Image (spheres, rainbow, N blue to C red):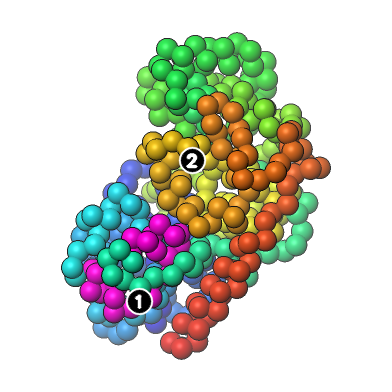
Amino acid sequence: MYGLLIREGKNRGSFKNIGDYVQSIAQRQFLRNEKTRFIDIEELSDFESEGRVNLIMNGWFTWNCSKFLPPKCINPLFVSFHLTPPKAKDFFTPEIIEYLKRYQPIGARDTLTMQMMKEHGIDSYFSGCLTLTLGKEYKTGIHDGKVLIVDPYIEFGGDKSLNLFSKVWNTIRFCIKYYNVAMKLKDNFINQDMLPRVRNRISRKLEHFIETATFYAIYSQRFSNDIIMNATYISVIVDNYISNEEKFKLADSMLKEYANAKCVITSRLHVSFPCLAVGTKNIFVIPSLRTEEKDVRRYSGRLKGLEDTVTVLELDRGRLINTKDVLPEVITIDNFPENKEGYKFYEKNLIEIVENFVNSNC
């Protein structure tokens, strides 16, 4: 029997990042319709089974370190394992270190996780992310669909380094300067959670207008009006109270959209990596990596070692800049950059590692 890791998020509020289920689908594609049981990634230690359960342990670990230690019935493959740095102190208990050593080497999704493992005496290697293998099931080679913009990263006032007065002034300026275009765009534009500073302080309609105007002020610097005004805007944030089956259907539907898209602009890792896997051109927009703020550390930690697989634009002091890649000054559908090839090395290795695990446990 196989387990299938999911993150139900039962105690994490009303909304769910469907990217968690994209990671589950990356496991599921290797299981060949084997009998499976859902196992909540945040409640591993509570799982019970009379027989052995083989489990691919990929994903983001973990909100609840006290519930991590898997029971004896689980036979794990640690691959594409990401440990969020703020949890490292609570995670690396003597019991967990001993357990991980039993199943080393640990395949780390990023080099920061690999480094943390090695610092605690655990053998580890850099595997990359399992979602890089999703082309196995979803790649069609046909990209005649829409331009997708998925949860684009923006900052209040366009620049997080500004003081509050300057941010408010910039916001007013954006709303006046781009009023007409924001009014046209706002009904299509979707952005779930990028301006927490203004949330709950103003009406949702006004907040959405501010988000739309701010988005246009930032992204029109580097992307053509044709892309911005005609794109389809979607979000990976969904209702958390729907069933697991419905969440899997949504994740499957989104992956098919990515596979069919002409190109994608996103700030979601588990949109960008699947796009690489299915051959859809995409640009990953993140905060500037030159600062040390919390959300920057979150992005940089998750990208460590994978920088050369994705095409990146950084939002730095209100401007979208390319620090690693040579990109057109204004990006259009016609000159949208091709994906890098670096991911293919990790894709090939991951497929071999996981298939060997599955074949040896049939």
Task: Tell me the quarter of the picture where residue 122 sits.
Answer: bottom left
* SS class, disc 1: loop
Q: Is residue 30 visible?
A: yes
For residue 114: magenta? yes
Crowd class of label 2 (few under 14; some 14 to 19; many from 20; radius 10 Å)? some
Magenta residue span: 96-117
User: Picture coordinates of residue 205 (x, y %)?
Assistant: 50, 21
| Whether residue 5 is situated above or below residue 154 in the rendered picture | below
**171 vs 278: above or below:** above
Seen in the picture, residue 231 relative to 95 is either above or below; the reply is above
Of residue 327 and residue 129, the one placed in the foreground of this image is 327
Name the residue located 35 percent from the left edge and 53 percent from the top edge: 84
Q: Disc 1 versus disc 2: distance between alpha carbons?
A: 31 Å
Q: Would you say residue 264 is visible in this rendering?
A: no
Q: Which residue is mark 1?
A: 104
Q: In the rendered image, which residue does mark 2 sit on?
A: 289
Please identify the quarter of the rendering in which residue 80 is found.
bottom left
